[in-house]
Structures are given as C-alpha cells and as structure tokens.
Image: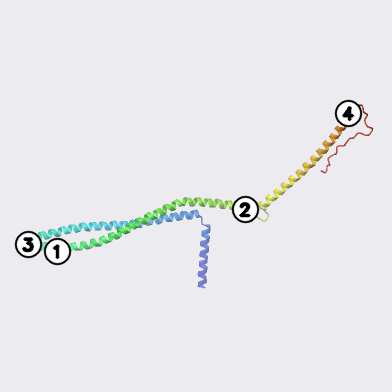
Amino acid sequence: MLQYLKKRWKYLVAKLGGNFEENADPKVQLEQAISEAKDQHKRLKQQAANVIANQKQTELRLNRQIEELERVNANARQAVKMADSAHQSGDVEKAERYTHAAEQFANRLLTLEQEIESLKSLHFQAAEAAEQAKNAVDQNSDLLQKKLGEKQALLSQLDQAKMQESVNNAMATLSEAVGEDVPTFNEVRDKIEARYAKAKASAELTESNVETQMLEVEKAARNVEAQSRLESIKAELGIASDSAPELTETVPEADPAE
C-alpha cells in the first residue's frame, strides 16, 4: 500500500509539473531565469569580495608582523650592545639586566619569524584564492552579459513563434468545421463556385439564343430588301413582274418559352 501511494504521489507531482511547464508563459520564465542569473552573480561577487578581503587582511597582518620583527630585532641588537658596554665598564648588574633583555628580544624574534612564515603561507593561499575569485567573477560576468544579449533575441523569437502559431490556428480553422451545423470554408467555397459556374453557363446559353434570333431577323430583312431591288430592276428594264406571288419571308417571332 505504501509503495502504491509513493508511486501515485510521484505520478501526481510529474503530472502537475508537466501541466505547469505546458501552461507557463515562456516570457515570464525567461525573466525569472535572467533574474536568477543576476542574483547568482551578485552572490558570487559577495563571496569573491570576502575572499579578497581575507587576502588583504592577511597581507596587513604580515606587513605588521614584519614591522614588529624589524623593531624587535633592532631592540635586541641595542640590548646586546648595552650589555657589552656594561660588561666592559665592569657594571655586572647592568650587564646581566641587558643580557636578559636581549634574550627576551631574541625569543620574541623567533616567535615573530614563525608567525611571519605562517602568514606568508596563508597570504600565498589567500592571494591564489583571490585571483581565482576575480577570474570567476569575470567569467560569470561575461556569461551574464551574454544571457542579457540573448534575451532580446529570444523574446523576438517568442513573438514570432506566437504570431506563427496564431496564423497556423487561423489556417486550421478555415479548413475545419467549427461545429456540426457550420460548414467548412472549403465547403462554402465549393458551393459558391458551383453556383457561379451555373450562372455563367445559363448566361452563355441565353446569349447564344439571342444571337441566333438576331441572325434570322437579319436574314429575313435582307431577303425582303433583295426582292424589292429585283422588282426595281425589272421595272427599269420594262419587264413585267411575275404573276407569281412576291417572295416574302415572315420574320419569326421569338419563342416566349426561350
């Protein structure tokens, strides 16, 4: 049962995560990524500043100890000189006191030398760490600038993608039925084209009938005119007209049904 609940929980988490990624706005996610990169760079700079500050502090301590070493060394030399002078003058008490002081200075010198060697090692390590920190900040700064430069290009690509998706959806809508009672664009186009073709065909047939009737009318009129001219020529020649009835041709009437 416990194993089943774990599997179910993992499934729900994966599903919710998938839905989130699918519905999330890439523009907002891009802004979040840039903001996170800026925060990371800020944290890196703070860490680098701490490393460099540690190197500077170690350097100050080292310089201070070196100055102290020079001062103690000078005091030790002076104590030795004073002890030797007191010994030559026969002042045993002063000679012993100066000798003791010189020994104290010598012990201090040994301690300072050890501390300085340790500080030199620390300073070397701190200097290396500070240099690495500087390089890391410079590299990350270059990466951040590159991301900021790519941001505008990505936003432009995102706008183009959205526009293309809108065009694709519009084109898909034109070739798909909106509902059960709504015809597709192609169906409507075919219907309109069929109606237009039928109307054009009917018009052509009508024009053809009118032209035929006009030709018949013109032919009949010409026959009448020819008969009249023939009669006129016979009269000029003194030839009597034929007793046969005149050749006349009746103009056909248009069929109302046409």
Mark 4 touches mark 2? (CB < 8 Å): no
Residue 21, horizontal then vertical, whole percent: 51, 59
**Disc marking residue 173:** 2
Crowding near pointer 3: few (<14 within 10 Å), some, many (20+)?
some
Mark 3 is on which residue type? His
What element does badge 3 sit on?
Answer: helix
Residue 162, horizontal then vertical, whole percent: 54, 52
**Disc marking residue 87:** 3
* Residue annotated with mark 4: 233
Nearer to me, 238 or 93: 238
- Between the C-alphas of marks 1 and 2, the distance is 101 Å
What element does badge 2 sit on?
Answer: helix
The quadrant holding residue 219 is: top right
N-term mark: 4 or 2? 2
Image point (51%, 69%), residue name: 7
Quarter holding the C terminus is top right
The quadrant holding residue 139 is: bottom left
- Between the C-alphas of marks 4 and 3, the distance is 183 Å
